[in-house]
Image: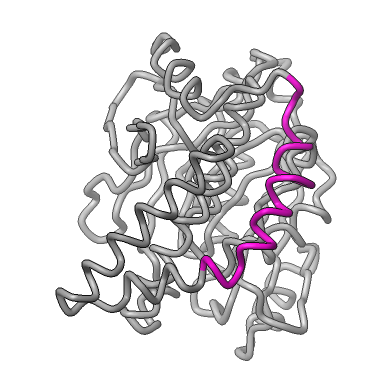
Amino acid sequence: MSEQIKLSVSIVIPNYNGQHLLVDTITCAYNALDTSGIIDYEIIVSDDASTDDSFHQVTNAFPEIVYVKNEGNTGFAGNMNRGIRRATKELVCFLNSDVHLSGGYFSSQLPLFQDEQTFGVMGAIFDKETNEPQDGAKSPRIGLLKIESNKNIISSTVVLPTLFLSGANALVRRKELLELGGFCELFNPYYSEDVDLGLRAWRNGWSLYFQPMAKCHHAQSSTIKKLSTNKVKIIAKRNKHYLHFLHLPSGVNHLYLVKASVNSFVQLLLGKPLYLQALLLVFKELKPLQLERKNRLHQSLKKKALSIFQVKEAIDGKVPLK
C-alpha cells in the first residue's frame, strides 16, 4: 500500500457555468486526496466558455488551481481533453462539477493499479438527496447489431469489471489515456463518449473496474437538465449510432445503419420524428466517422486488438475481486 500512496493524481473538473457548484466540489476533492494519503496532486478546472463568474469564484478561493479557459463552447469530450492535456500526474481523475468525493475516496482504488493491465477504476455514485445508488458496474449486452451498455450491477463490497467508467468520477492512467487520444470529440456535446473510451481500453487488452468502497455523491446531469428534452434525446440517439458505427466490424457497421434507417422510418410513421432526426445527423457526419475509424480509433488500438464481440468475453472472464 505504501507504494500505491506514492502515485500522483491530476483531478480534472469540467465546468460550464457551474460557479454555484465548484467551491464545494473542490473542497471535497482536496479532502479526498489528503485523507487518501496522496501527497503529489493537482486540480485542474477546464472551463467550456462559461459566462458566469466561475473563474473568479475558483481562483479567489483556490489560487493554486490550474484554470483552463476556452473561448468557445465545445461540449464534454472537447473540454475534458483540454484539461487532460494540461495534466502532469500518473493518474487522471475525471470529476464532474456536481460530484462530491467522500473522505478516503482514492484509498481503495489505488491498489487496483498494482496490476499493469488496469486502465482505470470508478467509484460508487449515490444520489445527493436520497442516497440511493445511481451507478454501478456496467454489464454489456453485445450482439451482431447491438451494443447495450447501461445495465447496472450494484455491489456493496466486491470489485467488479465494468464495460466503461463514468465520466463523472473515473480514475485512469494518464499514459494509456493519451495513447487512446483521450475522449472522441465526435461525441460532443455529451453522452456515450465515456462508453467509447471504455470500449477502446478493453479492446487494447486493458481492464476497467468498479470499486464500491470508493463513494461519492452526485446531483445527476445538473447542466443537461436545463436543456431541451427533445434535443437531448436526439443527441443521445445520434451518439448511440456513432458508437455502433465506430466499433462494429467493417461491413457490419453499415448493415447496422440500414437497420437503423428502417427503424427510423417506422418510428416516423408512428409520429416519432426524432429517430429520423438523429439518424440524419449521423449521415451528415459519415465522412468524419469513417476518418475516425481509419486514422485515430484503429491506429490507437494495438495490432492484436480485441473485436467488440471479444470485449464481452474479456469482461465475463474477469474474476470479481474482494
Where, by quadrant of the figure, is residue 156 drawn?
A: top left
Give left or right: position of 1 versus 198.
Answer: right
Q: Quadrant of residue 224?
A: bottom left
Name the residue: 64% across, 81% down. Answer: 54
The magenta stretch is 282-303
Residue 303 location (% of width, % of height):
76, 22
Relative image position of residue 26 (x, y in whole percent): 59, 60
In this view, 203 is above or below 23? above
Q: Quadrant of the C terminus?
A: top left
Q: In the picture shown, does residue 95 fall above or below 72?
A: above
Q: Is residue 289 magenta?
A: yes
Can you tell which quarter of the image residue 247 is in? Answer: top right
**Residue sitting at the far left:** 270
The residue depicted at 58 percent of the width and 72 percent of the height is 284
Q: Nearer the viewer, residue 96 or 274?
A: 274
Can see residue 39? no
Tell me which residue sits at (38%, 40%) in the image. Answer: 145
Q: Does residue 68 appear to the left or right of 224 in the view shown?
A: right
Q: Is residue 280 visible?
A: yes
How are the colours assigned in the image? one colour
- The location of residue 315, given as percent across then percent down, is 44, 20
What is the x, y in percent for residue 120?
A: 59, 31
- Magenta segment's dominant SS is helix
When the figure is inspected, residue 59 is found, relative to residue 105, above or below; the finding is below
228 or 100, which lies in front? 228
